[in-house]
Amino acid sequence: MINTPVFLILGGSFILGSLFFLNHYASESIAKTLSIFLSFLAILAVVYSPAITGHYIFHDDVHLLWRTGYAHRQLLLGRPLGGLVNFWANSQVSSINSTNFLRFFTIILISLIALAIDIWLNRVCGFLQKASFLASLAIVTLPPFQIYVNWVVAGNMPVAILLSIYSAMLLLKRERNKRFFLNPSFFFSLFLLLCSLMTYQAGATFFIALLAIWLIRVDCRGVNKIEWPRVHLVIYFIATLIYFFLFKILVPANALKMGIRDTYSNAVTSDYMGKLSWFFREPVLAALNLWHVFPSRAVAGGVLFIILLGVVIEFYCLMKSEENNRGVRTRNLLLKYFIILFLIILSFGVNLVARTNIFLYRTIESLITIVFILFCIGLERVIGVFLNQKKYEVCVTIVLLFVCAYGMFSAHMTFKRYCVDNNSRELSYVENEIARKYNSSIKEIYVIRPSRLPSVYVKIADEFAVTTCFYWFDIPDFIRVAAKEKGIFLPRIIISSGMSRSYLPQDQRLLRIDLNRDNESLD
């Protein structure tokens, strides 16, 4: 049951405030801004419709439903504001079906992100209005955003992205002001970026994605008149340094003693070259695959070819345009792409500084956005070689429409198959087993975990094609939540799990749930 007054007051205030803020930078009427937002919302509600009609939970969602400790855990991960978002989410749910409301709220937040990207592409980067709409819609159907919708406890992630976008937008009209550092907008932007970092660190790097998109559209024929986002970079590095100091205080050095995995300790890496090598082998490979969630070198190679071809065409057109100042234009082009490459690496900086290699789809939203825009610009430049200006604009819109349609269809099918259907089958199976086998004499429940991963699973991410029971530490709360759905409470039942059947005794007090019996359905 949703706590309706709290939901409407806090959630509604954030949404309305965001719409008025974004409308200010859109320089449009509030009616037009609202209509664009509602268009995004309507389309995304269809794309992610399985999330708001299904009966399932995933991974850490079980802790949100069974106990309130998950919000406190966010503090130990350096995300105190993320903990507040999770605490708010925890107060809104009391059953599995009520999580659908929170997933819909996440879709609303993602629609705001789409609106903000649309404004940035159109007003800052000079995209045509139709092109910016289609590109923005395509971006928010990429795999990281699918994870945000699928995972109820991931509600802090789109909030962090929105705060980072608002921080970047506050600086737009201040770049040329030499006394900007004395302006209140500077400090408010810094504050919002710090809030973003304290909500979800990887989400704050979307600030970097916006700067990279800005530079991708920079015209290098401007010689010395190019506007580089200097103030934005200053803000980002100041916020990062302040947060790093707070992070070392909030997050324990010995994470295991505090009940969290060592992966999330405050230790930083010293193997810089090894990290960069891993970055291009795994995260970049996954980003180049766009909607293809099980990475293929063939798909990555095709996307990279379009990107590099676009860069070559840009260089050719730059050299062909005028005979004067070719050296300066070449320098500008090289500097532009050197900074873009630096921003690409920086967009994954949160994971790169960690001691262990952590790649999760939910952390590459900035990286994959940059790659997608580079891919779109590459397509635009290839089209521009063959068509005149009038036909070029029409053709670009048609191609982007095709890319967007493919992205929405791919996102819907991937999300339904790997996120919703697998988890729904697992939950239904466990609920039915408990309802059928449980009685008052049962003292222990033993869950036999799947003996193998689904055949399609690739060991590059853990959020697609796996279910809650692949995480052994989620199983006890998962069983209690499933039992609660059937009206059965298990306050003092021992719940354990393992991979073996052999040692289990024939005991009437033992309830055994064998997930391997339903394992074929998870393929």
Image: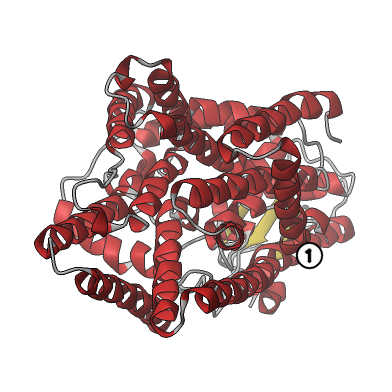
Left or right: 416 as drawn, with respect to 358: right
Residue 326: give x, y in percent of width and height. 13, 65
Amino acid identity at mark 1: Tyr
Between residues 203 and 340, which one lies in front from this camera angle? Answer: 340
Residue named by callout 1 = 429
Q: How is the image coloured?
A: secondary structure
The answer to whether residue 113 is above or below residue 403 is above
Q: Residue at x 13, y 58 (%)?
A: 331
Residue 483 image position (x, y, % from top left) = 81, 48
Q: Residue at x 70, y 49 (%)?
A: 36
The number of numbered badges drawn on the structure is: 1
| Picture quadrant of residue 141 | bottom right
Secondary structure under tag 1 reads: helix
134 or 372, which is in the foreground?
Answer: 134
Side of 348 where 166 appears, left or right? right
Image quadrant in which the C terminus is located? bottom right
